[in-house]
Amino acid sequence: MQSKTEPNPECNEVKVVSESAAATLKRNRLDFVHEVEKLPGGDKILECIQCGVCSGGCPTRYSMDYSPTQIVKMITLGMRDEVLSSYTIWKCSSCYTCTSRCPRGIDFTTLMMSLKNLSLKENKAKSTVKPKFHKGFDDIVTKYGRLDEALLLTKTIKKSDPNALMHTASLGMRLAKKGKISLRPVKIEHTADLETMRKTVVGGKKQ
Ligand code: SF4
Ligand code: SF4
């Protein structure tokens, strides 16, 4: 019979497993924090004091699943999948209110854009229309060097609600007749310069 003072082998096993899980959690947590620190807008992520000012002034907070303050906390806790698949990053309207008010100078707006890019790249977006809009915007600006609203609208609707395309097409024709939009995208002369700018900003790779 086992003495009361002897260590219980079963308990030891549980302890080993939990220590290893804790080490993995810690490593994952640090990996994500370091990854975010390298993203545009993420360099000061560890300086957040959880004051809640960003969430308090956010005009789209009501439609988010996690507040901006919670997203920052989740990043520091290494909750990578939860952050990248959250609706919050797609609900952000890039209004810059949080960035302009943050007492620690955290550029949360730019960070939201970086997280959108990462979410798209890894196919983690749960939201439907917004990621298509974001990708369409990026594709058009990359190709033409400027945004073409009619093309962006067509691309987004075609992928998200093809049935609505006919209605939008007739609206587009009416707007084109009045000279409000152009049906033919215009390309800028030096798209290569734009690519050079992009490489400078994102370190040579399209995110
Ligand atoms: S305003 Fe800045 S410091 Fe305050 S919770 Fe938001 S990110 Fe953190
Ligand atoms: S930039 Fe985005 S997260 Fe920040 S206040 Fe505006 S909508 Fe909210």
Image (tube, rainbow, N blue to C red):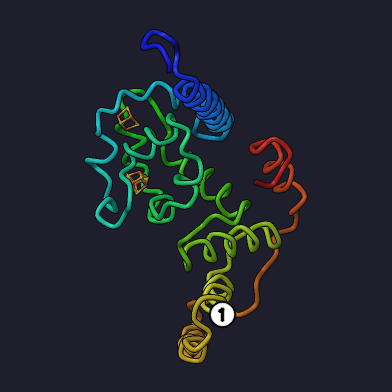
Residue at image position (47%, 63%) is 130
Q: Nearer the viewer, residue 64 or 192?
A: 64
Asked if one can make out residue 43 in the rendered structure from this viewpoint, the answer is: no
Looking at the rendered structure, the kind of residue marked 1 is Lys
Q: Position of residue 147 (x, y in %)?
A: 58, 62
- From this viewpoint, which residue is outermost toward the top? 5
Compared to residue 112, the image places residue 130 above or below, namely below
Q: Is mark 1 within 8 Å of ligand 2?
A: no
Residue at image position (48%, 25%) is 10
Q: Nearer the viewer, residue 15 or 54?
A: 15
| Label 1, residues with CA under 10 Å away: few <14, some 14-19, many ≥20 | some
Residue at image position (74%, 58%) is 189
- Circle 1 — which element? helix
Q: Nearer the viewer, residue 78 or 164?
A: 78
Q: Position of residue 98 (x, y in %)?
A: 32, 38
Compared to residue 85, the image places residue 110 above or below, namely above
Horizontal arrangement in the rendering, residue 97 relative to residue 159 (left or right)? left
- From this viewpoint, which residue is outermost toward the left? 56
Compared to residue 137, the image places residue 6 above or below, namely above
Asked if one can make out residue 153 in the rendered structure from this viewpoint, the answer is: yes
Q: Position of residue 87 (x, y in %)?
A: 40, 55
Compared to residue 168, the image places residue 4 above or below, namely above
Where the N terminus falls, by quadrant? top left
Q: Position of residue 3 (x, y in %)?
A: 40, 11
Residue at image position (43%, 22%) is 46
Q: Nearer the viewer, residue 207 or 67?
A: 67
- From this viewpoint, which residue is outermost toward the front? 1
Numbered label tally? 1
- Location of mark 1 (residue): 158
